[in-house]
Amino acid sequence: MASTSRTRRGRGRGRGRGSGSSSLPPPPSTLPLIIEEFFIVVCEDPLVKKKLPNKFADYLHGQEPAKVYLRAADCGPRLWTVEVLFDGQGRMYLDKGWEKFAIAHGVDFGWFLHFKYEGDDVLTVKVFDGTMCRRYYYSDGEDTDDESDDDVKPCIHPL
């Protein structure tokens, strides 16, 4: 009886732990580089162009968009058109159009912005204020395209 329990224990220990099991994921260096999410901290004037992480710019290499569409998470279907600037040295910036988005969402110094790349040049943005708490917005439902007028129509942050 004692030898049977030792045999069971012995077989169980060898599985998945360096025994050549094919169920282990490949080492990180062999995984494809997929940069879908990143964040930036607003450390300067919130209304000036914003530099995006170099790894994200590298991820888009060869498919650099002229503009992206920002969508505030949980704020309806509205897309904010923002021109993208590449400086020729691999750096990518949110440029013209960023100011409207920032004003409409009250972005301020010290805030934390989480971006998720949805494909088709769309970035969903979650906004966290200076207390590192997420701000939730909702739309009045009137306007879903920022190209229709020059007025900034803010998403509303419920109190």
Image (cartoon, helix red, strand yellow):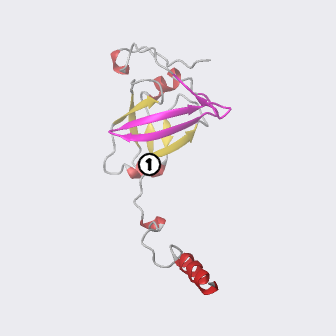
Quarter of the view holding residue 143:
top left
Magenta residues?
108-137
In the rendered image, residue 45 lying in the magenta stretch gets the answer: no
Vertical comparison of 154 with 3: above or below: above
Residue 10 versus residue 155 in the image, above or below: below
The residue to which callout 1 is attached is 56
Q: Residues within 10 Å of mark 1 (few under 14, many from 20)?
A: some
Residue at point 33%, 40% (across, down): 65
As for residue 134 lying within the magenta part, the answer is: yes
Residue 21, image x, y percentages = 45, 74
Q: Considering only vertical position in the picture, is 87 above or below 31?
A: above
Residue 1 or 139: which is nearer the viewer?
Answer: 1
Q: Amino acid at mark 1?
A: Phe
Whole-percent x, y for residue 30 in the image? 42, 67
- Image location of residue 17, percent across then percent down: 54, 75
Residue drawn at point x = 39 percent, y = 13 percent? 142
Quarter of the picture containing the N terminus is: bottom right
Which residue is the extreme one toward the bottom? Answer: 3
* Point 60% across, 80% down: residue: 5
Q: Is residue 16 above or below residue 84?
A: below
Instruction: Determine whether, in the image, residue 46 is placed left or right of residue 31.
Output: right
